[in-house]
Image (spheres, helix red, strand yellow):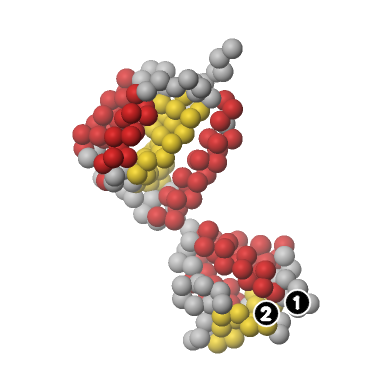
Amino acid sequence: MKKSKTALKKAYLYISKNEHSLKEKTGEIKEYLGRKAGSGIELKVFDSSDRQSLEDVEAFVSSPSLFSEQKAVILEHIEKAPAGFQKMAAERISRDSGADTIFIFTAPGEKINKALMDAVREHGVIRSIKPPSSADLLKWLEKKAKEDRIAFTGDAAHLLVENVSLDINLLKNEYRKLSDYICSEKEKTIISKCQKENSWTGSTRSVRISRSTTVS
C-alpha cells in the first residue's frame, strides 16, 4: 500500500541576511523532514555554488525512487546558482502538478532569477527570517541559567553574548562549556572579572574566554 504524500508546498524560499539564521532554518527543516522519513520523503542538501553539486541535483530529481513517494532538495544560497539552473528549477516547480519534488531554497535576499521567484511565489512560500537580536540571546541565557541555577552578572552575560556574534548555536555551545566547568561548585556564579581581559570566574574557579569564545 502506497503512503500518501505529505501535505507540503512545492517550494519554499527562506531569506535572511544573517547566515546563522539560514543555517539554523536548514537544520530545522532537515530535522522536520527526517522525522517524516517514514511518510516517504527522501531528502538531500546541495550547495548552489558548486557546479558538480547542481548536476547532482538534476540527476537526483530526474531519477526514479524505489523507496520514496516524494523527494525534497535543499539548495543553500540559490542566488549563487547559474541563471539557467534557476530557470530549470522554476519550470519544474511550475509543471510538477503532483509535487513529486519539494524545492527548498535559502538566500540572503531577493536577488534571484525572476522566473524562480515568481514560481515560488505562485506555488510555494517565501519567508523572511528575522535575525536574532542581543536581547533574544540574553533572554535565552537568562532562562537557561535560571533552569540550571547558574547566576550571571549583567556584565558577564552581555560579554558572552557579544563574543558569539549573535550566533545562538555558538552561545549554546559556550554556555554548555561554562556550565560543565562550574557544575560541581556550590555557588554557581559567573562574573566578568575583568572585561578588558575577558575573564570569568565561577565560584573559586577562573574561566577565560577569548574573543573567539574558546574556553580555556
Q: Is residue 11 left or right of residue 150?
A: left
Place of residue 5 in the rendered image (x, y in percent of width and height, measured from the top left): 52, 21
- Frontmost residue, 31 versus 149: 31
In the rendered structure, find residue 202 and report the number of the disc placed on it.
2
Q: Is residue 161 above or below residue 122?
A: below
The location of residue 171, given as percent across then percent down, is 54, 64
Q: Residue at x 68, y 83 (%)?
A: 205
- Which tag, 2 or 1, sits closer to the chain's start? 1
Q: Amino acid at mark 1?
A: Glu
How crowded is the residue under tag 2: few (<14 C-alpha within 10 Å), some, or many (20+)?
many
Mark 1 secondary-structure assignment: loop
Type of amino acid under label 2: Gly
> For the point 44% across and 56% down, which residue is it?
20
Viewer can see residue 57:
yes
Q: Which mark is residue 185?
A: 1
CB of mark 2 within 8 Å of CB of mark 1? Answer: yes
Label count reads: 2
Q: CA distance from mark 2 to mark 1?
A: 8 Å
Q: Secondary structure at mark 2?
A: strand
Residue 119 horizontal/vertical position (percent):
31, 29
Question: Quadrant of residue 34 in the image?
Answer: top right
